[in-house]
Image (spheres, rainbow, N blue to C red):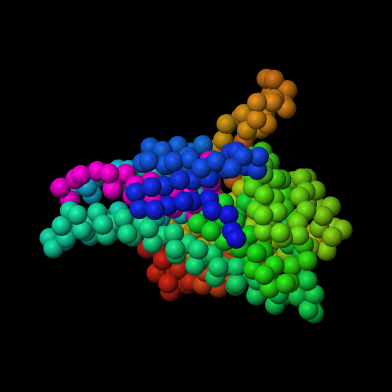
Amino acid sequence: MSLESIRYKRGTLEILDQLLLPLQTRYVKVQGVEDGWKVINKMQVRGAPAIAIVGCLSLAVELLKEVIDDKKVMRQEIEGKLNYLVSARPTAVNIKLAADELINLANTLSADDNVSPSEFKDRFISSIEGMLKKDIEDNKAIGKFGCEAILNSLKGDGLVRILTHCNTGSLATAGYGTALGVIRYLHESKKLEHVYCTETRPYNQGARLTAYELIHEKIPATLIVDSMVSALMNTRNITAVVVGADRVAANGDTANKIGTYQIAIVAKYHGVPFYVAAPLSSIDMSLKSGERIKIEERPDREMTHIGEHRIAAPGINCWNPSFDVTPASLISGIITEKGVFAPNQLKDIIYMHQTVVPKS
């Protein structure tokens, strides 16, 4: 059974505090937008899909408590609070796209004279709740398409060895996972020999979270430190690399956890296919290339300390970008819920499915 990172029933929301994993399992109540912003910003919840879902659900919880009889006031409240939630983690695009869609829905409901304030609220909250179910369905489709793509690239009928970076499983989504969903599907299909996960410094999402999920799912796995990737590919016959994404530009350039770019370079050198697994909602057609992706920088303390213990020399300067951008030229394919596509195919796929409206 997959881990449950988000617990929601109409009016109540709890998230698994990922700062305490793997040593403690504790759920935190999210009672409104302010709580939602805090758990996202503090990285108690993380992963682009989960950030979007928790942020929007925190608004749903808050709206249910409020009594607003004026639809225009409700629309203004919704827009302001969604824009505030987007500011919690600026690199992940999913929450921005979700906010844009929900603001459009609020505008439509507000302008419809046949929709009462109570119906406005109910339909708006129901739309947010639908995000949970859709994310799990999309993740399972990503897992299936990714599994098929990797197996089709094999010469023969052997088992595969996969390398992944950061955390992209049930803890980063509504359930099942993106890159870890591909690994899970390979395992369920009895085609996975082994998975290697990086520690993912400085926040150790691989060592703390991915390793935790792999053990929970009884998937054969080994943890490596970030600096071992080259040696691993040189000695262990890795079949493919599969990572997630926080934002994908229109040309396929992809922002993901810091360290992804160097893994892609090493994979290219060793002839190992490098896949990005992400829902179409991670693709931002307003950005022509990765150069325009805003990269969040995190506090020095994440590098200088582990818990309360200082590991770096006092007084040293730190540079701590949370993400880097992997050029499309290093990406073998982008695994989505609609199939696996070359980076240069993204525009056509987005237009076909009308997932987002391109901006000028």
Of the pair 291 and 167, the residue shown nearer to us: 167
Magenta highlight on residue 55? yes
When asked about the image quadrant of residue 110, the answer is: bottom left
When asked about the image quadrant of residue 182, the answer is: bottom right
Of the pair 222 and 76, the residue shown nearer to us: 222
Majority secondary structure of magenta residues: helix
Magenta highlight on residue 28? no
Magenta range: 44-71
Q: Horizontally, is 203 left or right of 105 in the view? A: right
Q: Position of residue 173 (x, y in %)?
A: 52, 55
> Who's the residue at 49% across and 67% down the image?
137
> Who's the residue at 65% across and 26% down the image?
308
Quarter of the figure that contains the N terminus: bottom right
Q: Position of residue 108 (x, y in %)?
A: 22, 60
Q: Horizontally, is 20 left or right of 153 in the view? A: left
> Who's the residue at 50% across and 57% down the image?
174
